Image (cartoon, grey):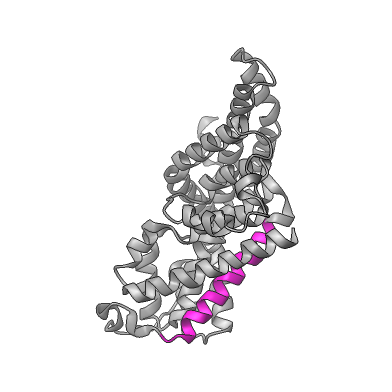
Amino acid sequence: MHATVLNLPRNYPRIFLASAAVVWLGLYQTLEPLSHALVKMLAVEPATHLYDALQFFLYDTPKVLLLLTGVVMVMGMINSWFTPERTRALLSGRHEGVGNVMAATLGIVTPFCSCSAVPLFIGFVQAGVPLGVTFSFLISAPMVNEIALALLFALFGWKIAALYLVLGLSIAIVAGYIIGRLKMEAHLEDWVRNMPHISVTVEGDTLTLTDRIHAGFAAVREIVGKVWLYVLAGIAIGAGIHGYVPQDFMASFMGKDVWWAVPASILIGVPMYTNAAGIIPIVEALLAKGAALGTVLAFMMSVIALSLPEMVILRKVLKPRLIATFIGVVAAGIMLVGYVFNVLV
């Protein structure tokens, strides 16, 4: 019996996927009542700061980890069609404009993290992908990734998720286009500019559904294994804000009427090193306490798209002037987004 269950993904992949989806949905439905039951078992007095903080933590931790595991599993399977080699081939030779749109869109479904920024950048340059198109991809991939969109959809609904998608893609497309029009190839490191160009070819796709399921499992082990500590830290911070920060307190310095809130949130976000799964619980708590949507989106985007560790990594291939231009253009786009939505929403 045990061996049959273990062989289910290989022998009956469709049955396995359907069964896994049913189990996942069943677990998700039990999370809220289970979190209340666990807090009551701890003998914490209801309607207190500690009760609210613990309930937030015990509810959001399994919820975010369950969502993260499900999304990474599905996207790991989808990403088996969008390997880095296939992405380079699709973007090779594309001109600015259409190329920026394609690159930003591919960034949504392409596996990416800060540690892979340099090899991806080098591969794009060698494949003859224009500099501005490359930057559209590098901005979109970490910021508008599938994990961020799925968690935003699950926690806040489709409107905010769609809003984030449109804004993130717009920043990636426009910023990449501007960098491309500035013709800053001379500000690549010399060894990068002197690399020989290569022709990129992609072999036919021969993976089966079982292979893609195993790719999904591998993505879960790799990504969830790397980010779960950031998730716990983000939820712990969010729980503290949810339980102990007075209602509407954040409005006093993160509200839409505070003119300096958007640039300040960007400056605070840049030195932070986390990912979408780790920052979204904090975003959830900030919005609940009266922070303006535009300010919070600007904070989230700056954490994900302009993290200091990624800039340090990119310094291996970019000269300081190009890095400064990249930061300035993206930060200006994020700031504009923050102000616009603080006015409109």
Q: Is residue 82 left or right of residue 163?
A: left
Position of residue 72 measured from the top left corner of the image (x, y, whole percent): 54, 50
- Residue 232 vs residue 214, the one in the foreground: 232
**Residue farthest to the left?**
191
- Residue 263 vs residue 158, the one in the foreground: 263
Q: Residue at x 43, y 50 (%)?
A: 272
Name the dominant secondary structure of the magenta segment: helix
Q: Residue at x 28, y 81 (%)?
A: 195
Residue 162 appearing in the image = no
281 to 98, vertically: above or below: above
Q: Quadrant of residue 310?
A: bottom left
164 to 255, vertically: above or below: below
- Residue 203 vs residue 97, the one in the foreground: 97
Q: Which residues are magenta?
A: 161-183
Residue 275 appearing in the image = yes
314 to 11, vertically: above or below: below
